[in-house]
């Protein structure tokens, strides 16, 4: 797959800010490969609309925020994701709230659709690989993923 690199800012202040000497300097940025996300790849080719992409990103964010991914050792690093407006909650409460939202979204997708959602959205597996793993016919995953993301978008109330 061809790499598609873009620069994203790490701070919300904007593209320029002044340093201690009053000079304007660029804010911190990170280079991101948009081709790494299967959802962005499908969206860039017109297979997913903005609503479905947002639903998938919301599900992935809750997956990361809830720290559901398996790990070998104890992790002490905080998850760095956008704020969800959960002010006043402790870190553990935010993690539990994200887990409840994630479980609710997966339930809303329905039986049989959680596999494709987890593989493509959360694990970042390419759609053809997910189809092979699930023993589905080629090019059927796109349709099933769209159905699952429609239901997830309804759960997150994304219009």
Image: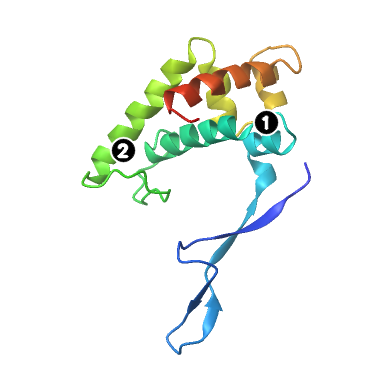
Would you place residue 53 above or below residue 79 in this image?
above
- Kindly indicate the quadrant of the structure image that contains residue 120: top right
Q: Residue 39 vs residue 98: left or right?
A: right
Residue sitting nearer the eye, 46 or 118: 46
Upstream in the sequence, badge 1 or badge 2? 2
**Res. 123 in view:** no
Residue sitting nearer the eye, 130 or 6: 6
The image shows residue 44 at horizontal and vertical percentages of 71, 39
Residue lying at the far top of the rendered structure: 111
Query: What secondary structure is found at the residue carrying circle 1?
Result: loop
The image shows residue 89 at horizontal and vertical percentages of 22, 43
Q: Residue at x 54, y 32 (%)?
A: 56
The image shows residue 136 at horizontal and vertical percentages of 69, 12
Query: What secondary structure is found at the residue carrying circle 2?
Result: helix
Q: Residue at x 36, y 46 (%)?
A: 75
Residue lying at the far bottom of the rendered structure: 21
Residue position for label 1: 126
Q: Residue 149 vs residue 98: left or right?
A: right
Q: Quadrant of the N terminus?
A: top right
Residue position for label 2: 95
The image shows residue 154 at horizontal and vertical percentages of 47, 22
Q: Which mark is residue 34?
A: none
**Res. 131 in view:** yes
Using a 10 Å C-alpha cutoff, classify the residue at mark 1 as few (fewer than 14 neighbours), some (14 to 19) or many (20 or more): some
């Amino acid at each position: 797959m061809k790499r598609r690199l873009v620069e994203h800012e790490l701070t919300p202040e904007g593209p320029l800010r002044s340093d201690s000497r009053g000079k304007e300097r660029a804010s911190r940025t990170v280079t991101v490969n948009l081709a790494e996300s299967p959802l962005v790849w499908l969206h860039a080719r017109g297979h997913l609309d903005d609503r479905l992409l947002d639903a998938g990103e919301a599900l992935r964010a809750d997956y990361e925020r809830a720290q559901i991914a398996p790990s070998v050792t104890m992790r002490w690093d905080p998850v760095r994701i956008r704020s969800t407006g959960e002010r006043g909650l402790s870190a553990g409460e935010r993690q539990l709230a994200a887990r409840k939202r994630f479980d609710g979204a997966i339930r809303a997708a329905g039986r049989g659709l959680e596999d494709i959602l987890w593989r493509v959205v959360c694990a970042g597996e390419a759609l053809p690989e997910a189809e092979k793993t699930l023993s589905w016919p080629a090019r059927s995953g796109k349709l099933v993923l769209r159905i699952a993301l429609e239901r997830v978008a309804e759960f997150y109330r994304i219009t």
